[in-house]
């Protein structure tokens, strides 16, 4: 089992069985993603594509169906490695996979985090930054045509998708220490990480609602998620015009805005990313002058307004001994002035011919190299099928021509797998992974089922059943209770739920009638210093005049015996009810 299979098995819940197909392309020269600054040459850039598809087989091999796919583009230069999340999509057929109790969460987030962390680890180079970049924009379907017809497919809205990606990238981020973490916890020789998020139209405080929950646990001086962008930090020349600092990715909302702004330049060329603005140009747009103004204007784009939003996310991995922004600005040399051309001396002497060298094999091709000064390409991190860029795009076109609607999803899955196998001359490919992560079991039963099975989540408590009172005690005078009734009531209390200090018995007292009624005795309630202290069935009154006692009618709900004690400075009277 290779490294990726081991990582996926550790991330998936126990018993979850999947099959993945990894296709990659040979690193090939491409147009630079950053426009060249005025007077400078464009960066030499290589692009490597990685495509991962995941399938399940609910019953047997004939029932195999795709459930997820993700495409990552790796752009490499001498100074920077950028991993761009191009597309990611699901079909909704993951519900057919029987998952054990306690593992009801979808494994797609774990698969995405694991694949990203695995690729980042194998594409890092010493002394060179690695950046994970993506934009989150909700669509019905990206890679699986017809999958929206599946009623089981859950399509997130824009806000939910931004939060999902922040949670997915958070494990990759926290695998490395923070940029300003204390040296007591981490060594200075370790790579640090920092995440950035921009949602055009949202300010700093509104953006925090998209951060993962772990953001609240970060100390104030080491926040792992920040509102903003690292474009100046990762640029060659931070003081360059804004168009030279913003990357140009395929099918990117900000890339389309860049193309529109480039039309404002008088010296606009065919490809502004591969050709510098020229000697007479400055590379500055007429309408947008700064990066801050660029992001403010992005909020009014059709893709970022009218109820829609787009989240731009970066995760920057900085190795040790990388100069800071101020150091880069101070050390960046000025553009060298071209020297005056010198006259070449004419060749003289005897011409000695040499034998031609025949190139038998592409010894310097990217397919045989594990890396160069522009990229790294370890053999154990390549796809199961490695294609040239032309064949890779043909494989993607094949997937986009298939139909993954209910009823056609199995046949489309089989056609794509066999189609790529025939391209490289093999019969079968793909690797099966069984999860081995122990997930704590979560009781998903309802409260009614738990009560039926006799399971109590709360501590054991004594519950007393209220007894109905046959008749309420009434009359102008306090009723008299016989000794036999008092003894039987006392026995009933002792035989039932015994009262403790924690649960005193409840004694209900009928409220006093208004003083304005004629049958009530004229008593000043305020001057009688009514205490009304209730404890274990004893009601205390303190009055300065025992002859002026208001009529009190009591009835007992929980116990049959109550004692009313009248307290005076001279004498104490006690009556049982």
Image (spheres, rainbow, N blue to C red):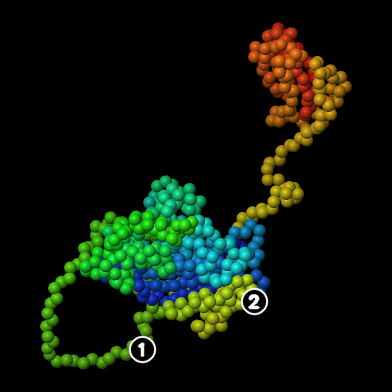
Residue 145 in view of the camera = yes
Residue that mark 1 sits on? 360
Above or below residue 3? Residue 424 is below
Report helix, strand or loop for mark 2.
helix
Residue 461 horizontal side relative to residue 94, left or right: right
**Percent x, y for residue 171?**
49, 58
**Percent x, y for residue 510?**
74, 23
What residue sits 24% from the left and 66% below the top?
Answer: 281
Q: Quadrant of the C terminus?
A: top right
Above or below residue 565? Residue 396 is below
Residue 472 horizontal side relative to residue 157, left or right: right
Residue that mark 2 sits on? 62
Label 2 or label 1, whichever comes before in sequence order = 2
**Whole-number angstrom distance, CA of label 2 to CA of label 1:** 45 Å
Report helix, strand or loop for mark 1.
loop
The answer to which quarter of the image holds residue 441 is: bottom right
Q: Most extreme residue toward the top, as rendered?
A: 570
């Amino acid at each position: 089992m290779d490294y990726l299979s081991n990582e996926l098995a550790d991330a998936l819940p126990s018993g979850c069985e999947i099959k993945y197909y990894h296709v990659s392309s040979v690193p090939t020269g491409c147009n630079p993603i950053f426009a060249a600054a005025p007077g400078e040459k464009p960066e030499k850039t290589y692009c490597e594509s990685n495509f991962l598809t995941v399938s399940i087989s609910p019953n047997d091999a004939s029932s195999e169906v795709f459930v997820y796919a993700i495409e990552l583009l790796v752009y490499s230069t001498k100074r920077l490695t950028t991993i761009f999340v191009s597309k990611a999509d699901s079909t909704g057929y993951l519900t057919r996979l029987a998952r054990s109790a306690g593992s009801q969460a979808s494994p797609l987030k774990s698969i995405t985090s694991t694949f990203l962390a695995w690729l980042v680890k194998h594409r890092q180079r010493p002394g060179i930054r690695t950046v994970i970049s993506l934009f989150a924009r909700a669509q019905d379907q990206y890679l699986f045509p017809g999958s929206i017809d599946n009623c089981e497919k859950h399509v997130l809205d824009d806000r939910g998708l931004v939060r999902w990606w922040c949670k997915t990238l958070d494990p990759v981020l926290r695998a490395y220490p923070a940029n300003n973490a204390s040296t007591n916890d981490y060594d200075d020789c370790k790579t640090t990480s920092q995440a950035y998020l921009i949602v055009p139209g949202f300010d700093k405080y509104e953006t925090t609602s998209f951060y993962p929950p772990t953001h609240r646990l970060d100390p104030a001086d080491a926040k792992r998620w920040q509102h903003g962008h690292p474009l100046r930090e990762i640029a060659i020349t931070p003081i360059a015009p804004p168009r030279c600092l913003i990357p140009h990715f395929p099918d990117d909302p900000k890339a389309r805005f860049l193309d529109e702004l480039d039309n404002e330049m008088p010296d606009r060329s065919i490809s502004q990313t591969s050709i510098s603005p020229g000697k007479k140009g400055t590379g500055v747009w007429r309408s947008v002058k700064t990066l801050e103004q660029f992001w403010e204007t992005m909020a009014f784009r059709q893709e970022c307004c009218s109820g829609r939003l787009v989240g731009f996310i970066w995760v920057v991995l900085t190795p040790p001994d990388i100069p800071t922004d101020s150091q880069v600005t101070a050390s960046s040399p000025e553009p060298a002035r071209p020297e005056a051309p010198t006259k070449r001396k004419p060749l003289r002497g005897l011409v000695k011919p040499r034998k031609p060298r025949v190139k038998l094999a592409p010894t310097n091709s990217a397919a045989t190299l594990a890396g160069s000064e522009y990229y790294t390409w370890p053999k154990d991190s390549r796809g199961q099928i490695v294609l040239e860029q032309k064949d890779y795009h043909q494989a993607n076109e094949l997937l986009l021509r298939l139909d993954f609607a209910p009823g056609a999803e199995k046949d489309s899955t089989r056609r794509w797998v066999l189609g790529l196998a025939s391209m490289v001359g093999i019969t079968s490919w793909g690797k099966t992974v069984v999860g081995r992560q122990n997930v704590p079991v979560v009781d998903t039963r309802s409260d009614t089922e738990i009560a039926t099975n006799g399971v109590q989540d709360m501590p054991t408590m004594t519950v007393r059943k209220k007894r109905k009172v046959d008749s309420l005690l009434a009359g102008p005078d306090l009723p008299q209770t016989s000794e036999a009734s008092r003894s039987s009531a006392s026995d009933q209390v002792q035989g039932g739920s015994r009262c403790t200090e924690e649960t005193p018995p409840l004694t209900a007292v009928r409220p006093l009638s208004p003083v304005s009624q004629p049958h009530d005795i004229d008593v000043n309630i305020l001057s009688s210093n009514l205490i009304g202290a209730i404890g274990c069935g004893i009601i205390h009154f303190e009055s300065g005049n025992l002859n002026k006692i208001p009529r009190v009618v009591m009835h007992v709900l929980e116990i049959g015996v109550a004692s009313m004690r009248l307290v005076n400075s001279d004498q104490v009277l006690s009556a049982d009810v």
